[in-house]
Each structure stands twice: as structure tokens, then as C-alpha cells.
Image (cartoon, grey):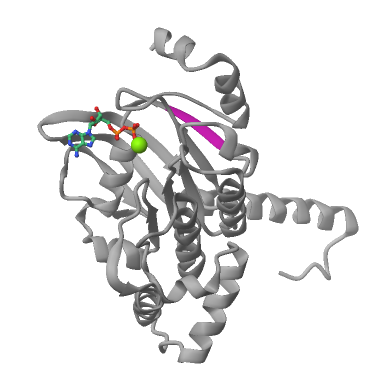
Amino acid sequence: MSYRHVQPLEREERHKDDMAFVHELEKFEQILRPNLLEINGLHASVAGREVLRGINLAVGAGEVHAIMGPNGSGKSTLASVLAGNPRFEVTGGEVLFEGRDLLALSIEERAHAGLFLGFQYPVEIPGVSMSAFMKAAVTEKRRHEGLEPLSASEFLHLSREKAAFVELDHAMISRSVNEGFSGGEKKKNEIFQMAMLEPRLAVLDETDSGLDIDALRVVGGGVSRLRGPENAIVLITHYQRLLDYIIPDFVHVLYKGRIIESGDSNLALRLENEGYDRLINRA
Ligand SMILES: Nc1ncnc2c1ncn2[C@@H]1O[C@H](COP(=O)(O)OP(=O)(O)O)[C@@H](O)[C@H]1O
Ligand SMILES: [Mg+2]
């Protein structure tokens, strides 16, 4: 658009119009852009018992959400359903990942789509070295993105860098996956894997017990590092202490399979002081 033949005052008016138009367009784009994760009315059962009873949650790009709640609320069940664990049966609702039906995707396809699940009890894989396991995972991810596999030396360089970042002794990379790892080492290893794969969405189901201050700091640091405008993190945690290291944008309280309260990081602090009782009695 040319302003050359327009009087100064009129030019200003037009500029204002243009800005309003641009603003509208941006708002529209925001609406068009799907949430990274959207859970609508999710119901799920395990062993014939309904554990998730209508979960609604929207996670946008760039956000960190903490899911808290008493034991047995269904936190790990939610993580298992997102992971595609066949033991958990979805009986209602939907889960959209970047607008796609996540529940229709295989476990492998979920990983390709950029979903990373960290488990409360990480599995041990005797006989498979960490390096072979991660090389395969990184190669698979790159293949899906149309990239060549990393050379051995490139992979070594990357894994050294990421291991240093979680303060994981790089020598551990040659050991079997999680075999004989201490609780803290397993957690560091989990964050190491996350750092290697750079997922769009990480769902971390925390073992709060058994995490020492050192492991907490590493997990917190890892999560902070992954935080970026294009990706998001869902932190499942029983205690607020992890949230000292990573301040969430949103905190949700899960109780008996439903989110009974949502707020900002102050909610976690309030729960630390008051416990869950007041919320539960109200629910
Ligand atoms: N594999 C399973 N078989 C039977 N019941 C299960 C299984 N996993 C979870 N549950 C039950 O589902 C409920 C929620 O558990 P869970 O999701 O682990 O809670 P949280 O992680 O919040 O402590 C509990 O009552 C638990 O006993
Ligand atoms: Mg749990």
C-alpha cells in the first residue's frame, strides 16, 4: 500500500486501520493454532474400575503445567493413557495433540509426533546399552524428520553434551538401560533422554519420594532448559518442592479422576501450607 498521495493526518488514520487489521489477523491466527494438547471429557478405566472421570485440560505451546493431587487420584493413570498403555481403557472423551486424535495413534506414532513420557517407575532393559538405545531413538526421530542418522562421532558429541547438562556420568551411557541405576540416576537418565530427543510435549510423572536435592535440581534444570515457545511440559508431582526449581504457568489439582481446582503457581504454595483437605471437602 502506498501512502505517497495521502495527507499526513489521513495517513495516520490509515496506519491505525492497518494496525487494527494486523491485530485482528494475529488474534485469528491464535484461534486457528491448535493447543499442543487438549483433553476433553476424558474417562478411562483400569481393571474394570473407572479412574479418570472427565478430565479437561488444555496445554498451549510454551506452557508448563503442574498436575498435583493426593495419592490414587489418577495422575499416573492419566500419564499411562497419554502414553498409550493398553492396560488402560479409554471409555469416553478425546485427546488432541496439535489437533490430531492422539488416542488413535500407536505408541510409536505418538513419539514421532513429539510426545515424551517420563515414567514414575522407569523400566530396566537388561542387555541393551543406553548408547544403543538412544542412538536408535535419535536415529528414528531424525528419519521421521527426513534427516540422515548422526555419525558415531556426532552422536558421541551430542550425548556428551546432554549428559554433562544433567550431570550424568557419561560412562553410564555404556551400561544397560536403567539396570542397577539408583533412583536419582534413573531420573537423571530420564531427563537425559528428554534432552536428547527434544520433544514438543513432555509429560513427566515424578517419583517424589527417593529424589534427593541433587536429583530435584537436575530434573528442575532439565525441565527449565526444555522450556521454549514451541514446546510444553506437563509435570505430575505430589509435592510442591519440585516447583521451587521450575515455576509452572498453571497448577491443577486432580482428585478422584477429575481436576477440581486450577490456578497459577501460587496454588501449589497454598497446597503446601494448607494441604488438600480444604479443596477435597469442597469437591
Ligand atoms: N494397573 C492397575 N490395576 C489396577 N488398578 C490400578 C492400576 N493402576 C492404577 N490403578 C488404580 O487407579 C487409581 C489411581 O491410581 P494412580 O493413577 O496411580 O494414582 P496417582 O498417580 O494419582 O497416585 C488407584 O486407585 C489405583 O489403585
Ligand atoms: Mg502416580
Asked where in the image residue 104 lies, by quadrant, the reply is: bottom left
Q: Position of residue 281 (x, y in %)?
A: 41, 8
Nearest the viewer among 178 and 274 is: 178
Give the residue displayed 61% in from the left and 44% down from the top: 213
| Residue range highlighted in magenta | 249-253
User: Residue at 57% across / 25% down in the picture?
Assistant: 267
- Asked whether 250 falls inside the magenta stretch, the response is yes
- Which quarter of the figure has residue 78? top left
Q: Residue at x 51, y 17 (%)?
A: 275
The reply, left or right, for residue 3 in relation to residue 24 is right
- Please tell me whether residue 14 is drawn above or below residue 77 in the rendered image: below
Q: Quadrant of the N terminus?
A: bottom right
Q: Is residue 108 above or below residue 90?
A: below
Residue closest to the eye, 215 or 191 = 215
Q: Determine if residue 58 is in view.
A: yes
- Whether the magenta-drawn stretch holds residue 240 is answered as no
Counting from the top left corner in percent of width and height, residue 135 is at 39, 79
User: Residue 207, image x and y in percent?
Assistant: 43, 42
Outermost residue on the right side: it is 8
Instruction: Point out the quarter of the image occupied by ligand 1.
Output: top left
Q: Nearer the viewer, residue 109 or 272?
A: 272
Q: Please tell me whether the stretch drawn in magenta is mainly helix, strand or loop.
A: strand
- Determine whether 78 is above or below 159 in the image: above
Q: How many marks?
A: 0
Query: Which quadrant of the rendered structure holds the C terminus?
Result: top left
Residue 196, percent from left and from top: 49, 70
Q: Residue furthest front?
A: 180
32 lies above or below 57: below
Q: Is residue 249 visible?
A: no
Residues 281 and 153: in front is 153
